[in-house]
Image (tube, rainbow, N blue to C red):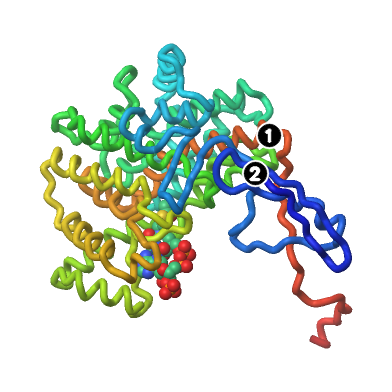
Amino acid sequence: MDAQPARLDVGDQSLDLAPVKASVGNDGIVITSLLAKTGLVTVDPGFMNTASCTSDITFIDGGKGILRYRGYPIQQLAERSTYLETAYLLIHGELPTAEQLDQFLARIDKHMYLPGDLREILAVQPRAAHPMAVLGAAIQTMACFYPESMDPLNPAAVELATVLLLAKMPTMVSSIYRRASGYAVLYPVRGQGYIENFARMTFQRPGEDPNLPEALIRALDVLLILHADHEQNCSTSTVRLVGSAQANLYASISAGVAALSGPLHGGANEAVLTMLAQIRDSGRDVASFMTKVKNKVDGVKLMGFGHRVYKNYDPRAAIVKKSADEVLDALGVKDELLDIAREVEDIALNDDYFIERKLYPNVDFYTGIVYRAMGFPASMFTPLFAFGRLPGWIAQWREMMNDPATKIGRPRQIYVGPVERDYPPLQQR
Ligand code: ACO
């Protein structure tokens, strides 16, 4: 069915609002002329009902639990693709041919090293610094090292910045982790493979076998794919907004990292682990914890459950749950927290409180357990999220820059402060 025009009556004025047709999902109506024609602005805190753009990149149907990148279901990508191939898909719109993929991988492989001075900058940050603060600063600083890739209106410069960001992200994340943990920072090895390099630079310990289990490498790849894009979320909207001022890609991505550092956005998987540990330490009484959640005792929530968009099982959570079993088996890790998580989920999925409110596990419910089994401390969970989300941020920024409808982002407000008054002299205040 065609998108329907809407008519809005304001006093004795009638306005026809043009429709915007979606290929699948919610259609829209254009309200841009409202202010000029009626003197009214629309109010929508949190953008609960505002589409800031049209986009070809990611589709979510939260009611049905669907997530697709460029039309491809997340399950198929997680099963058959790799993080870098998915990055190419998100950024360029189509899956690469074998030749395109080879060229893309070779270009990234060539740029994985960090220039010495950038390594120095990472090395002088306090060891106790939050990894997200260091990561945001490092990405912003890349602009100082590669000025030839800064022009947001030059396609070759943007392509170079894209490759440099994707290439250096794993090296930066592993360097930040190694420095915080007190281990020597390792170099990437040309031709070793992207995820393999990241895993080795992160986990190799002095005197230990550098060969890591294949299941760990694949699980890392899949976790990054699952986080690669999620349409107009807080950090992605931030990247677009900063970029709409024609700020360079590094500045825009660094702003996305800043948004993701907020606990309401990137920090829930850490909170899940804390919650599961509390249940374990209080005698593993899952049933009474669930009763507290349902009775809203002291605002206790089931962390890793519920989502603003998904009112069904988050498709990413189902994939991570399977991965958790495989990784723990492959690494020979037995984690009581995974058993508790399964027990919590079983109770919740069969309990009216959660069923009526459509509360299902979200992507964060099992990711912390998998990362912990791999050996990551909780402070690295959000940088790993940023690593995964990087291709989505880049793809969304590039789409915005190439969209002729883009204007600098500049919301309106409803002013509710004092009306005009006279400036009183200091003695009269
Ligand atoms: N545990 C218990 N009850 C919950 C939970 C939860 N995790 N989430 C929502 N509810 C209840 C609310 O108390 C409310 O109950 P009521 O109708 O009796 O008042 C009802 O479900 C609706 O909740 P809202 O807060 O309106 O749902 P909203 O869509 O605004 O919130 C959110 C979504 C913030 C994710 C919420 O579910 C939550 O806090 N979950 C736990 C934190 C979490 O896991 N965050 C990660 C999200 S995924 C991500 O960011 C990558």
Judging from the image, what secondary structure is the residue with disc 1 in?
loop
- Mark 1 and mark 2 in contact (Cβ < 8 Å)? yes
The one of 53 and 148 positioned closer to us in this rendering:
53
Q: Position of residue 225 (x, y in %)?
A: 38, 36
Residue denoted by label 1: 403
Crowding around mark 1 (Cα neighbors within 10 Å: few <14, some 14 to 19, many 20+) is few
**Residue bearing the label numbered 2:** 53
Whether ligand 1 has any atom under 8 Å from the Cβ at mark 2 is answered as no
Q: Which mark is residue 367?
A: none
The total of numbered circles placed on residues is 2
| Precedes in sequence: disc 2 or disc 1 | 2
Say which quadrant the C terminus sits in.
Answer: bottom right
Q: Position of residue 351 (x, y in %)?
A: 28, 68
Visible residue check, residue 125: no
Query: What residue is drawn where x is 13% and y is 71%?
Result: 283
* Mark 2 to mark 1 CA distance (whole Å): 9 Å
Crowd around label 2: few <14 · some 14–19 · many ≥20 (10 Å): few
**Amino acid type of the residue that numbered disc 1 sits on in the rendered structure:** Asp
Q: Is residue 346 visible?
A: yes
